[in-house]
Amino acid sequence: MALYLVKRLAAAAVTAILASLIVFVLVRSVPGDVVAQMLGQTSDPTAERALREFFGLDRPMYRQYLNWLSSVLAGDLGVSWTRGHPVWQMIRDALFVTLQVGFMTLLVGTLVGVPLGVIAGIYEGRWLDRFIQSFNLIGLAAPVFWVGLMLLVGVSSLFGWSPPLLYVPPSQSLSENLAILALPIVSLGLLQAAAYSQFVRQNVVSAFHQDYVRTAIAKGVPTRIVFFRHILRNIGIPLVTFMGLILIQILGGTVIIESLFALPGLGRLLLSSIEARDYPVLQGGLLVVVLIAMTVNLAVDLLYRVIDPRVRLT
Amino acid sequence: MTTIVHPSAKLQVSPVGLMQRLKREPDLVIGIVLLVAVAMVALFPSLFAGQSPLSINIDKALEPPSAAHLFGTDDVGRDVFARVIHGARVTLSICAGALIISAIAGGGLGLISGFAGGRGDLLLGRVVDVILSFPPVILGIMVTGILGPKTINLVFALATVYMPVFFRIARSGALSEVGQTYVEAARSIGLAEHRILFRHVLRNVMPLILVQYVILFPLVLQIQAALGFLGLGVQPPTPDWGAILQQSKDYIVLAPWMSAFPGLAILVSALALMLVGRALQRRLDRR
């Protein structure tokens, strides 16, 4: 296990360095840089040269990359070129919003999706199963932001309520914070519940067709016990893997939902820093996103080995 | 020279009636019916919508659905029904084109990479891993940000996002084919490597790529709509479902019909593709 861990971490480190290079190149490919944005229509060659020198844009590309990489490795993401704040602080604040939405979505999705999938699996082929499957399909086919828009119309016309426009952190007022996040979380959660439910149903159905389950049922073990003792235990492993996938998907989904509900999350930060050509923020933000995704994947792999002893042997 | 194809590679088509099929695979039949309907709308929009999707009539702005305007009118008095109907071709052709590019480029690279193996394969695999660790929407935003908000750029952005998926599928397909006896046999009779690859291996990997194409289509549709919604896709006044949603979000409480119908169009198209995709995947799994 220790050797495996070292190997995996080394591979992850290589991938992370490669990711940083890709991020750097991607960011520098956005046409027009911060200097052009700042100067606008005026073209003053002296000012332009001075600004370029100030931001270090006059140095060769590989030097810029190595400088950035070495300060990132030292834990310094730099300072925003347009807002003057430390990049890490901006990312941390935005990440908090995104992660709050993400984890609450995961919670809603799991609490709704897993039981639905289990029920559909147990009642395979019957009307309840068909009903849940239809919900799953519609949930997966509907665009997240459209569901958000429709929910907005729905609650405002039914209850005359619309969410507050300005984001409030939970430390300031938890109830207001939740009021703002309710609709984004429900719209994202619905999609995740559908994905979860479909996945769980598939696993429950295939578990029911396994020999050991058939044997247990044949010898008269009550379905309830078969379910909790045998089936649930076996769908745990694929569920963990799936959760990792879902987490990364939620990360992407929040970006759109954030722009719809005006939440100051990571997606909005990335979008605004693309517009401003704020390289340090953009590079830092993208790197954080990729690192989160990689960490989730690694965690899933490791958890997998802990849960399933068979994997450890291979 | 005849081509060697797995007997199982052909999808079995048994001569059963539509009713029988409806009973056995209702989702496939519903999916196909919906898909044909969507395709008809995309191919012949003028048959369904008599009014122009672009003609502005300020006097009739923000009218709710009525007999004259089935889906109501938008903020400058354009017929929403006509915009949704004409948007089908714009939206779906962008998705289809993007997926074709990524299937050819990603699938082709994956096929060669898996077949050839070696260091190149290792390096490409790493790069693909990194690209796959970006959430698709964020990668799409980055690439459209780099290229600028134009329709053709949107196609390339979507193609980039899904290229790694095709790469992986084709690579794993090629890897499992390389060990087959027929490849060995072809090599032993002195067939050139590229001929083995493109004549025989490709034939057997093709079903995987085609099924993946259908399965990915609804996902691409969602990302395409999301990018359009963020203003990064098709620019006004061209009717595109995502772009219509972007323009109508400011009127969401005042004129919800402006948003409801384009979203519904995305939902129905994605649903049709998902139903067909699932049925195809089932057949592939049965092999």
Image: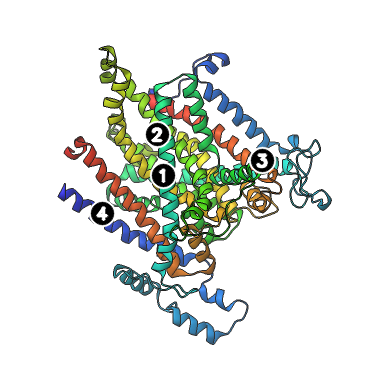
The residue singled out by tag 4 in the image is A11
Mark nearer the N terminus (4 vs 1): 4
Q: Is residue A194 left or right of residue A209?
A: right
Q: Which mark is residue B261?
A: 3
The residue singled out by tag 1 in the image is A106
The residue singled out by tag 2 in the image is A114
Mark nearer the N terminus (4 vs 2): 4
- Badge 1 marks a residue whose secondary structure is helix
Up the image or down, B133 lies above or below A33; here it is above
Graded by Cα atoms within 10 Å as few (under 14), some (14 to 19) or many (20 or more), the crowding at tag 4 reads few
Q: Mark 2 falls within which chain? A: A
Where residue A155 appears, x then y in whole percent?
A: 61, 44
- Of residue A295 and residue B30, the one placed in the foreground of this image is A295
Residue B115 placement: quadrant:
top left
Q: Mark 3 falls within which chain? A: B
Real-space Cα separation, disc 1 to disc 2, in angstroms: 11 Å
Q: Mark 4 falls within which chain? A: A
Real-space Cα separation, disc 2 to disc 3, in angstroms: 31 Å
Residue B193 placement: quadrant:
top left
